[in-house]
Image (tube, rainbow, N blue to C red):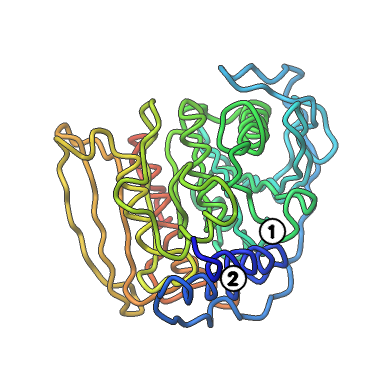
Amino acid sequence: MDDKIKAAMAEATRLTQAGRFAEATALIQRVLGARPHDEDALRKPPVAEPDIIEGDFERVDDAEASELGGVRHGAGPLGPSGPPGVRPSPGISRGSFRDAAGARDYRLYMPRQLADPAALLVMLHGCGQNPDTFADLTRMDALAEQWGFAVLYPAQSPVANASGCWCWYDPDNQVRGAGEPGILAGMTGRIRDGCRLDARQVYVAGFSAGGTMAATLAATYPELFAGVGVHSGLPYGIAGDMVSALTLMAQGPGGGEVSPPDQRLPPIIVFHGDGDATVSPANSEALIRQFLPGASVGLDRVRLDGRSDQGVGYSRIQYKRLDGALLAEHWLAQGLGHGWLGGRASAPFAEPRGPDASREMLGFFWSLSGRSVPEGAV
């Protein structure tokens, strides 16, 4: 690496630490010879946070949360201030989880009517976001009401990252039983058990840095999650520091840079805009390769292209086993950038003209359990 590139990487690191992600990525792209891009999606003004419905509690029983195999559960409270065995009332509640790996706050949304059995979806926000803004962007609370599932939004600590990014590029956060994966897995198990949710229907999804951390959780705790959704993220474990992370964000990994973990991973659905200049769309293709067993040998590849209601074209490719089991799905929206496809138009990091990533993600997850989409939910 020559002195010019080293200096650029140092400046990009400084910009990232200051929360100036678009400038950092643009600098890396200029140095690496990448094309210029439209950053309008990153410059949208923030919107006011939605009104919060603070949750009360209803006692269900005094049973302690059961142990999840391989996951250490912490001693933190289940609800905003309640002990294990207390379920928050419908609406929004807030709490904090702590174990040996550390502590994080969270926002929990419980619908008025849970399905039986009820799923849990863990939603990991991206840089410059928080649980409230991410819920607003994705409309996932409203979908939880329609579909009858609980939504857990963990919050990154400003002490861990001043810009609110999950630190997926740190090797300490790429292993089981420690760091951010350990905290998030423990939190998930505690909420799942305390709220009496279905262990067979626990899913994790995220956007950008949160999407990469979702892939990390699926790779380090594959027995905990039945499916994973990654929107505008990167493969698990490909970066070892912030400099390599920025480089991979800008240009994507090479064909030989992504290796799958030893164990079989849960099914994955991936969304990306092919005009994304913050996280290269090449990362979405690498994610599919990483999560498919045996480099997709012996799989059926089904292509289902289409257009969103707003006329944006997209490719949609499903990868199935010969027995019909769905293992992966890859959506690539034409001309759209670094934003949640079909997200709320007023929210930062939204690409509202795209296909509805939130609904399509839920449809993918529900298909894995063999359950029908709730009537009127689509």
Coordinates of residue 65 in the picture (x, y in percent): 68, 20
Mark positioned earlier in the residue sequence (1 or 2) = 2
Q: CA distance from mark 1 to mark 2?
A: 21 Å
Residue type marked 1: Asn
Q: Secondary structure at mark 1?
A: loop
Q: How far across and how far down the image is residue 173, in percent?
A: 61, 38
Q: Residues within 10 Å of mark 2 (few under 14, many from 20)?
A: many
- Horizontal side of residue 352 vs 260, given as left or right: right
Q: Amino acid at mark 2?
A: Ala
Contact, CB < 8 Å: mark 1 with mark 2?
no
Disc 2 on helix, strand or loop? helix
Q: Nearer the viewer, residue 41 or 111?
A: 41
> Picture coordinates of residue 3 (x, y %)?
55, 67
Name the residue: 81% across, 43% down: 56
Residue pointed to by mark 2 = 24
State the residue at coordinates (19%, 36%): 324
* Residue occupying image coordinates x 17% and y 51%: 302
Is 146 placed above or below 50 here?
above
- Number of dots carrying numbers: 2
Q: Tell me the crowding category of disc 1: few under 14, some 14 to 19, or many 20 or more residues within 10 angstroms, Cα based.
A: many
Residue located beneath label 1 in the image: 130
Q: Nearer the viewer, residue 139 or 288?
A: 288
Q: Where is 74 relative to 202, above or below? A: above
Residue found 70% across the figure and 62% down from its top: 17
